Image (tube, rainbow, N blue to C red):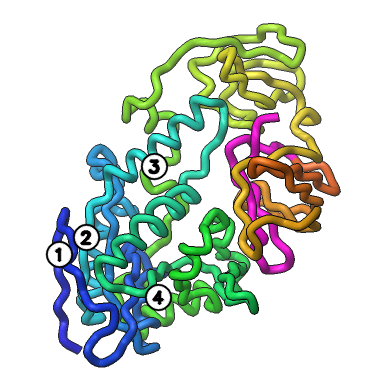
Amino acid sequence: MESFARFTPRATPPILAAVTGNGKTRVLVGMSGGVDSSASAAMLIEQGFDVVGVTLKLWPQDCVNRAEDKCCGPQAVTDARSVCHKLGVPYYLIDEAEDFQKEVIHYFAEEYKAGRTPNPCVMCNERLKFGNLIRRADQFGAQYIATGHFARLEKSPDGRTLLYKGRDERKDQSYFLFSLKQHQLSRAMFPLGDKTKSDTREIARECELKTADKEESMEICFVPDKDYGKFLQQADLVQKHTGDIVDTDGKKLGEHNGIEFYTIGQRKGIGLSSPTPLYVIELDAANNRVIVGDASRLESDEFMVERCNWIPFDEPSGTLEVTAKIRYNHPGATATIEPMSDGRARVKTHTNQRAVTPGQACVFYQDDLVVGGGWIARA
């Protein structure tokens, strides 16, 4: 196979025909420089698609030097480019840093300022990987985009595109895709949906791809050391500002340097001594207060979600019985969902849940089907 890999930062790609001369359907593959997207590209070539590899340069410049081996660093680009060269497909690097700053990093900072805990991966998928990348696919004449997510897609009898968990439950990433709309899901492909992580590495080894044994990153791409507070300050998105730490009766127990540096359920790093453990149970942005209490105050069985997105239907016809995940690593809890007006829904879990956190995504499942989800609202 002839190699014609290209490296064109900041370039607008030319308009290409949607179907190549040999009748193959073109797929734009989002290349992160990891094993999953590498194996996805290899599988699509084997299945007869005309593959074009693209990496969206999302990182701000001040992240680059601190994240050279992560998905927002130059090494990731080098690896993605190498994989495409090995597979004999075109490769493009496209600068989307401005939109990433606006759609993801700005959102990330504003959520913390509002006393909520953001989920930037969901927002990045919705706005960039399945937003800007689809627009780029149109420029490339590609009918589909593909990524290395562990999730599955199927068509329903009425023509909707349904989202399901990946077969490998340990790697399932459907949680991060719940907010995708029908026009995005209908153009998406997840080649690894039926694969395990070990399958993926084996595919890459068989193709002699340099990413086959590459370690995977579990961190937020632009916060490689997991210290989001330090990132917010270094990026000049948040400045320290003193406020009160109070108990549930409003009694002052100490001071904090900014509610942005705390999350619901946090115990360590509060800076208080107490005969019983104290946890962050609420962040009061309006009054610049961190409210603490004992572990029992973290338990709840009812909360609201907003900005709901439904996948099998436009709107539910009534209440729904689901399994609700209130964070990515949450095992899920049986719950009753009562849809309300203005894109909101009331979630009533059948058992108490710990640290239901405003700003996090709550995703609804029926078996492996993603019914939808929303963003946890403040109590």
Total residue callouts: 4
Q: Is 333 rendered above or below residue 296?
A: below
User: Between marks 3 and 4, how big is the CA–CA gap?
Assistant: 26 Å
Local crowd at mark 1 within 10 Å, few (<14), some, or many (≥20)? some
Residue wearing tag 3: 103
Residue wearing tag 2: 93
User: Between marks 1 and 2, how big is the CA–CA gap?
Assistant: 6 Å
Q: In this rendering, which labeled residue sits more in front, label 3 or label 1?
A: 3
Local crowd at mark 2 within 10 Å, few (<14), some, or many (≥20)? many
Q: Determine whether label 1 and label 2 are within 8 Å by CB.
A: yes
The local secondary structure at tag 4 comes to helix
Q: For the magenta stretch, what is the residue range?
A: 354-379
Examine the image and state in which quarter residue 173 appears. bottom right
Q: Amino acid at mark 2?
A: Leu
Q: Determine whether label 3 and label 4 are within 8 Å by CB.
A: no
Residue at left offset 74%, top offset 47% = 339
Nearest to N terminus: mark 4 or mark 2: 4
The local secondary structure at tag 1 comes to loop
Q: Amino acid at mark 4?
A: Ser
User: Between marks 1 and 4, how big is the CA–CA gap?
Assistant: 20 Å
Residue wearing tag 1: 7
Q: Determine whether label 3 and label 1 are within 8 Å by CB.
A: no
Q: Where residue 253 is drawn, which disc sits there?
A: none
